[in-house]
Image (cartoon, grey):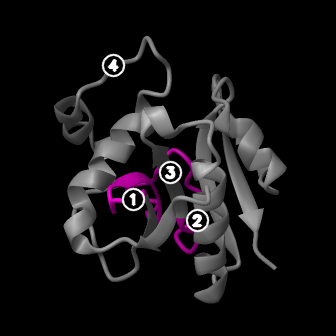
Amino acid sequence: MTDLDVRAATPVDFDFLVDMLVEAVNWLPERNWSREQILANPALAHYVAGWMQPTDFGLLAVDEAGRPVGAAWFRYLTAADPGYGYVSDDVPELTIGVVENWRGRGVGRALLRAVLDAARARGISTVSLSVERANFAARLYAAEGFRTVESFEDADTMVRTLP
């Protein structure tokens, strides 16, 4: 990832975060949910709705021309409106997406490491996520120290304790 930079996500990055949520949801080639379908689904839309709340934070990977190619962000969701990777109200949930033609080039790993460093710097001790077991990203998360705390039919909730 030598030709990419990582920068903080801002409120103006909302549309790109939605794009990356679409990429994350549609990781399977045969799944093709539209942006509109995802934003109309409360279980998915809450990962981006109202971005950027005071407790939201994230990072974007950008290419040499400054174009974003991936994003990783955390959101605190609540028991009243839990995410797929919900653990507790005080554990933020990670969402990560990479533009399709940038996958497999280290962008996701670099974003993951950088956003975990940012969480650690904010004093966060635990983060969570949900990943479908067949998704290649599940192996990345395990390799980066995430452990499964709950399993469902096709997906796992994983957490990472930050030293």
Say which residue label 1 marks. Answer: 80
Say which residue label 4 marks. Answer: 32
The quadrant the N terminus occupies is bottom right
Dot 4 or dot 1: first in sequence order is 4
Which residues are drawn in magenta?
63-92
Describe the element under mark 2 as helix, strand or loop. loop
3D distance between C-alphas at marks 3 and 4: 18 Å
The quadrant the C terminus occupies is bottom right
Which amino acid, by three-letter code, is at mark 4?
Answer: Asn
Q: Residue at x 17, y 33 (%)?
A: 36
Say which residue label 2 marks. Answer: 88
Q: How many neighbours does mark 2 have within 10 angstroms: few (below 14), some (14-19), or many (20 or more)?
A: some
Secondary structure mainly formed by the magenta segment: loop
Which of these two is toward me, 156 or 163?
Answer: 163
Count of numbered circles in the view: 4
Q: For this view, does 125 lie left or right of residue 74?
A: right
Query: Residue 24 falls in which quadrant of the image?
Result: top left
3D distance between C-alphas at marks 2 and 4: 30 Å
Disc on res. 96? 3
Circles 4 and 1 in contact, beta carbons < 8 Å: no
